[in-house]
Amino acid sequence: MTIDLPLPQSPGLRDVPVSDVPANRKDFASDQEVRWCPGCGDYIILAAVQAFLPSLGLRRENIVFISGIGCSSRFPYYLDTFGMHSIHGRAPAIATGLATARSDLSVWVVTGDGDALSIGGNHLIHAMRRNVNMTILLFNNRIYGLTKGQYSPTSEPGKVTKSTPMGSIDRPFNPISLALGAEATFVARTLDSDRVHLTEVLKAAASHRGTSLVEIYQNCPIFNDGAFDVLKDKEEAEARLVRLEHSQPVRFGDREFIHDAHADNPTQAFEISRLDDGTMAHVPIGIFRQVSRRTYDDEVRAQIATAKHNFGDGDLAQLLAGSDTWTISGAQS
């Protein structure tokens, strides 16, 4: 019996003729006019993704981008791949079904801090907990952009917005800490303005078997302009950014230790994630965690293959009737 499971770290690569594989960025750009506000960080991320996708060696029909609702969620329109602009906060749930049903696809989720961490919070944490084979790009601009500038689950305390005219009194999420707490097997952070670092992180995330969560600090020039300026100034960045590389020293202040992204226990990675606070004095970027674990979709397909082997295709009518049904007769009005 042959069980049709995906190749490790190579979703969608099976039986792909080399001549059909797109070769450059233009092959992945759709014919739709890109519409974001001038200066939006989404332009940079889109360009980086389009330039990176050919390196996967996949046909466009083997790649799917699923988004929820928000500025970042326009992404599928601008890529010449399969895609779906779906429901607010529900992109990880839809992607879970697709990744489970289609082992030949490279499944991507594009979401924002509002879409993913507010209405979509449960869907996000359970996708990561289950370790579904998908790559999640979480654009974090610390504001609601599409709905015109309300505070979001990552806005800093005291943030004055249209919905918090006297300043936000909420404590914000740290998306990296949240992902590590949900036992995500790949967790990383990068910046929209650092094209080289962004591309390196995307490559690592795409090659990971399981759920990859990549938080991308992204500027909103209209409603939260300059939120990450201290990380984009060369001198400030040198002092503030804590660059993470597996097995390399991590230094900040008077502390130093060796970063182990492959540690099964995420405690150290979680501790590193807590360095980040509202002052941005120490902001870790890079890969926090990268470990191997069986994926939810692989396990589901293995169960189906085992059931088929043991019981055949089954009888749908018999399954629906089951042994727990009964007929009530003789009822009087």
Image (cartoon, rainbow, N blue to C red):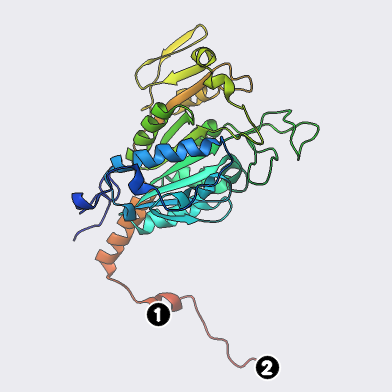
**Residue 254 spot, x, y in % from top left:** 51, 6
**Quick one: label 1, few (<14), some, or many (20+) residues within 10 Å?**
few
| Relative to 44, residue 26 above or below | below
Q: Nearer the viewer, residue 37 or 159?
A: 37
- Residue 106 visible in rendering: yes
Q: Residue at x 52, y 56 (%)?
A: 86
**Residue 285 spot, x, y in % from top left:** 47, 24
- For badge 1, the amino acid type reads Ala
| Relative to 310, residue 64 above or below | above
Image quarter of the C terminus: bottom right
- For badge 2, the amino acid type reads Gln
**Quick one: label 2, few (<14), some, or many (20+) residues within 10 Å?**
few
| Relative to 97, residue 286 above or below | above
What is the secondary structure assignment of the residue under circle 1? helix
Give me the C-alpha separation between circle 2 and circle 1.
Answer: 30 Å
Circle number at residue 332: 2
Q: Nearer the viewer, residue 310 or 126?
A: 126
| Relative to 178, residue 17 above or below | below
Q: Nearer the viewer, residue 176 or 131?
A: 176
Q: Quadrant of residue 161?
A: top right
**Residue 41 spot, x, y in % from top left:** 53, 35
Left or right placement of residue 28 versus residue 125 in this view: left
Residue under pointer 1: 317
